[in-house]
Amino acid sequence: MRRTAFLALAALSLAFQAHAAPASPDSVDALFKPIKADALLDDSYVQMEKVIQQSMAQADQGKPMTPALEQAQAVALKRTMEVVRTEMSWASLEPQMIQAYVRTFSQEEIDGMINFYASPTGQAVLSRMPTLMQNTTLILQERMRTILPKLQDIAKQKEAEAMQGQ
């Protein structure tokens, strides 16, 4: 009896979702205003530049840091960021982002998000999201420090087992 009621409720829910009005591109564009999507992307460039700079430094690890190498790194970083800023500009991404939201959310859900993010609570969430992301990144990094030795042990065990099987 419970199972039948659950299945009926699930079917009704799916039927409702199938008839939910699709989000309009204009409403998604309206959602991007209170969340300041363009500014969020601009802020992410700073983080991207740091990651790219660290990757370049790791790639050059072990090489003597001559003035010529430092200059070449600076030029490469500048050119890389120019490409990133051009190819990942909000103007170039916005049409695709709108379509992703239109395909993912109903009009009712977009309207709810607009109301939430336009509210003081929504704005507080947005303003604190970078701090939350930093805090959760620290948690994940710490967790990886405990997991990494276990993963290395698994890799060593795999190699040992493969050697025994030869």
Image (cartoon, helix red, strand yellow):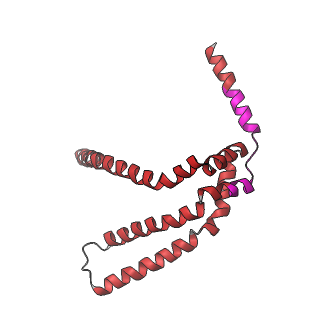
Q: Position of residue 26 (x, y in %)?
A: 74, 57
Any magenta on residue 28?
yes
Residue 61 against residue 30 in the figure, above or below: below
Residue 149 against residue 94 in the figure, above or below: above
What's the magenta region?
10-30
Q: Is residue 105 visible?
A: no
Q: Position of residue 51 (x, y in %)?
A: 40, 66
Q: Residue at x 66, y 17 (%)?
A: 4
- Asked where in the image residue 32 lies, by quadrant, the reply is bottom right
| Magenta stretch, overall SS | helix
Residue 96 against residue 82 in the figure, above or below: above
Q: Residue at x 56, y 52 (%)?
A: 123
Q: Residue at x 47, y 75 (%)?
A: 80
- Which one is in front, 72 or 28? 28
Please state if 150 lies on the left or on the right of 111 as rendered: left
Residue 41 against residue 78 in the figure, above or below: above
- Which one is in front, 116 or 2? 116
- Residue found at the very far front of the displayed protein: 120
- Residue found at the very far top of the displayed protein: 1
